[in-house]
Image: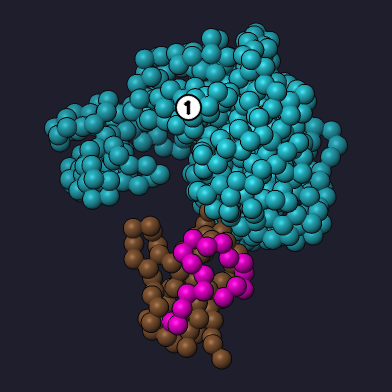
Chain colours: A cyan, B brown
Amino acid sequence: MKIKKLLIANRGEIAVRVIRAAKELGIKTVQVHSSADTESLAVKMADEAVNIGPPPAAKSYLSIAKILDAAHQTGADAVHPGYGFLAENAAFADAVEAAGMIFVGPRGDAIRTMGDKVAARVAALNAGVPCVPGSEGRVDDHEQAKRIATAIGFPVMIKAAAGGGGRGIRIAQNMAELETMMPQASAEAQAAFGDGGLYLEKVIERARHIEVQILGDGKRAIHCFERECSLQRRRQKVWEEAPSPVLPQTVREKLCASAVALAQAVNYRGAGTLEYLYDDKTHEFYFIEMNTRIQVEHPVTEMITGIDLVREMILVAGGAALSVAQNDVRMNGHAIEVRINAEDPAKNFMPAPGTVTALAVPGGPGTRFDTMLYQGYQVPPFYDSLLGKLIVWDNSRDAAINRMIRALHELRVEGLATTKPLHLALAADAEVRAGAFHTRWLEPWLEQNLDKLKS
Amino acid sequence: MAKHILSPLPGTFYRKSAPDKPHYKNEGDIVAIGDVIGLIEVMKSFNEVKADQAGKIVKFIADNEEPVMAGQPLVEIA
């Protein structure tokens, strides 16, 4: 069934991105929005807009009932969830389909499997995808924990089975520490989560974050190569690129094939990303999790492959087969994306909502700026701080960094503080230029380079 | 004249540190300068609101989870 009218259940730059893709396909658009987003660019661009509630997301963008009401009221036949909000909520995907509409994304059961850490790990191992070495599920007693730790090697992470978001994690450097920490970790997990269950994982030190973009139509899955997103602050990506500056071709082939195997195993439909940790000394990679949605950093993949990922996910949701075969997916040049956030890097990334009094958008060859800003727009304080993404492409990584510096100097957002000075400082750094970083590289660098972060 | 504690930031006002925790302050409580009276969530980051004057809380003008603008009165004290 071809989609005729698409409802966008999201906001900000990704709503604008989805509306653009829909318009190019001749699909009508409905933008739902909170009362804080009445003046948003997505609302102005969409064919129709429906106010679904007050500013707090729980009462608007996270309200399944209000979104479905808006879809019925406008006659939408499909829903695109964007990223964040309800994008990885299996109950939402099920509810959209139960209401007779198309969910632009995977089926609810694929979201459910990949959203459960243990189920995702089992699916990955069954598909032959390497995972971080550790206990297969919970450890029952200390003797078992000691055997596993000996087998995988120290340091090991002790994690709460019911934990998440970095809570309930301890790192043991040796057997003595493991013995002391196990009872503490179990008691803490019992208190925090009502479940004292623990599992063990090997610590991958100085790991890089590399992820593989995949596309599926429910029958066939392909990969669109990898992205590297190792420059992170508080586990939030700030600079993403494709391809990875360090991945050897032979490893790339194995990594991407493993991602396709897992996507194929769950009959994946839509765009998805498999995240891995990569050890650039041993060339080993380990699956950590799958994101069953379009990602913020998808444009770097679009720039090196020429594939429009958002268009493709809308088409396959409408029942089409993938428009490209694996052999047609070619990698060309190098792309980098930096996140322009309403945060002041010189003031510990303090959020800076406000009104955009002047705006100059970079242009020229190989330059793309995905944003929801316009001059006079008042950035609301209720949602995340992403204002836009500056993406550049060039023949080589070096040339792309030079182009990024040029484009950043053209970008001018007045009226609020942004992360532009951070990206200029990173682009000027010798280690960034050499691609010599890992996921724990940026935070100490920020402490040592505070003087470079002033606008 | 009534004294007010104003919101230092635009965002969402919370009267407690977590949904299952008690309110930081209640009507009738005495506040000292520097006491935390609530949180403002702005772009997913949480910032404490501290009393910049001392006195007794007459009433909360902003409710828990209410969207507020910078400079908007949150609490009336006497």
In percent of width and height, residue A39 lies at 73, 51
Q: Residue at x 40, y 62 (%)?
A: B17
Q: Is residue B48 visible?
A: no
The residue nearer to you, when weighing A219 against A296, is: A219
What is the quadrant of the N terminus of chain A in the image? top right
Left or right: residue A237 compared with residue A5: left
Task: Identify which residue is drawn at 60% across, 64% down.
Answer: B10
Specify whether residue A285 is painted magenta.
no
Of residue A195 and residue A451, the one placed in the foreground of this image is: A195
- Which of the 4 image quadrants contains residue A339? top right
Q: Nearer the viewer, residue A435 or A132?
A: A132
Q: Which residues are magenta?
A: B57-73
Q: Is residue A281 left or right of residue A334?
A: left
Q: Secondary structure at mark 1?
A: helix
Q: Quadrant of residue A299?
A: top right
Q: Is residue A2 above or below residue A161?
A: above
Return the x and y of residue A418 as percentages of the image width and height.
Answer: 68, 55
Farthest front residue?
A73
Q: Is residue A187 visible?
A: yes
Residue A381 place in picture, x, y as percent = 61, 57
Q: Chain of mark 1?
A: A
- In the rendered image, residue B7, in percent from the top left (x then y), is placed at 56, 71
Tell whether B53 sits left or right of A7: left
Disc 1 marks which residue? Answer: A94
Quadrant location, the C terminus of chain A: bottom right
Vertical placement of A182 versus A55: above or below?
Answer: above
Q: Callout 1, which amino acid? A: Asp
- A256 shown above or below A182: above
Which residue occupies 53% across, 9% down? A219
Kindly identify the residue that appears in the image at 54 percent across and 18 percent down.
Answer: A269
Q: How many marks do you count on the picture? A: 1
Dot 1, crowdedness within 10 Å: few (<14), some or many (≥20)? Answer: some
